[in-house]
Image (spheres, helix red, strand yellow):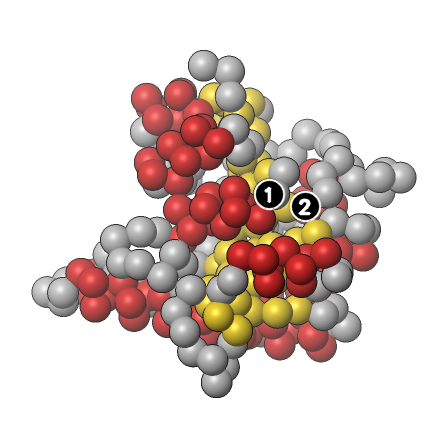
Amino acid sequence: MAAKPVYRRVLLKLSGEALMGTDAYGINRDVVIRIAAELKSVVEAGVQLGIVIGGGNIFRGMAPSAQGMDRANADYMGMLATVMNALALQDALEKAGLPVRVLSALRIEQVVEPYVRRRAIRHLERGRAVIFAAGTGNPFFTTDTAASLRAVEIGADVVLKATQVDGVYDKDPKKHADARRYDVITYGEVLAKRLGVMDMTAIALCREQGMPVQVFSIHKPGSLMRILDGAAEGTLVRAGD
């Protein structure tokens, strides 16, 4: 680890699927414990860590299981799934010895704190990891958009988008052996080529606010710390267009 991390405050976007491991659905406890250990190292390195977590391992508003449902109702179910994932990650982080708070965009005060921007920043400044649950609190918006929004609100230096692959490719690397990974790409290229880094609303917000996005694989041990060390890892999405 470098003497000083390259980022002071980061927003990590974790998909719900990242918590499944090789399971078909749900939460794989061993995977959550491994991720928690890496996140603890990030905070111990002096980086303020915010986390937005998805719910696709439990329920997704646009999934086949939601077909025929009212879209708003399905999206609210997805938001509740993110709260469940946030509680699982909170438990693992606390057992690892890291102070953490869950702040929810939906008010469930018997379980988690409501999201208040100034409260979130205060927790970060006191060395606590902060998990932002329930997306934006509104249907029709993804947790990618929530990650971009929270990153801007808390003054993060970068969005770290943890995915199942090690960066952004010109086509699906699982289907095409000749897929090429980008080391650096602009917001405009992502939008024009519809590369699926994040949804269009999320990328547009990052572009407007000049918020860089680092896309990397959550399954590569040590990847987060290498990013904080300034090493090349995954794909950086930034201005330049």
Q: Amino acid at mark 2?
A: Arg
| Neighbour tally class for label 2: few under 14, some 14-19, many 20 plus, Cα within 10 Å | many
| Neighbour tally class for label 1: few under 14, some 14-19, many 20 plus, Cα within 10 Å | some
Q: Is residue 74 left or right of residue 198?
A: left
- In the displayed orientation, state which residue is furthest to the right: 3
Percent from the top left, x then y, of residue 235?
56, 31
The residues bearing labels 2 and 1 have C-alpha atoms spaced at a distance of 8 Å
Of badges 2 and 1, nearer the viewer stands 1
Identify the residue shown where x is 39% and y is 56%: 136
The N terminus, quarter of image: top right
Q: Is residue 11 visible?
A: yes
Identify the residue shown where x is 75% and y is 61%: 126
Percent from the top left, x then y, of residue 153?
52, 47
Q: To which residue does mark 1 refer? A: 155
Q: Quadrant of residue 17?
A: bottom left
SS type, badge 2: strand
SS type, badge 1: loop
Q: Are the two marked residues, 2 and 1, in contact with CB atoms closer than 8 angstroms? A: yes
Q: Is residue 45 left or right of residue 30?
A: right
Identify the residue shown where x is 61% and y is 69%: 101
Residue 172 vs 14, above or below: the answer is above
Q: For residue 227, which numbered disc appears in the image?
A: none
Q: Amino acid at mark 1?
A: Gly
Residue 190 vs 163, above or below: the answer is above
Q: Is residue 160 visible?
A: no
- In the displayed orientation, state which residue is furthest to the top: 241
Identify the residue shown where x is 46% and y is 55%: 15
Q: To which residue does mark 2 refer? A: 9
Q: Is residue 66 left or right of residue 93?
A: left
Q: Earlier in the sequence, mark 2 or mark 1?
A: 2
- In the displayed orientation, state which residue is furthest to the left: 68
The C terminus, quarter of image: top left
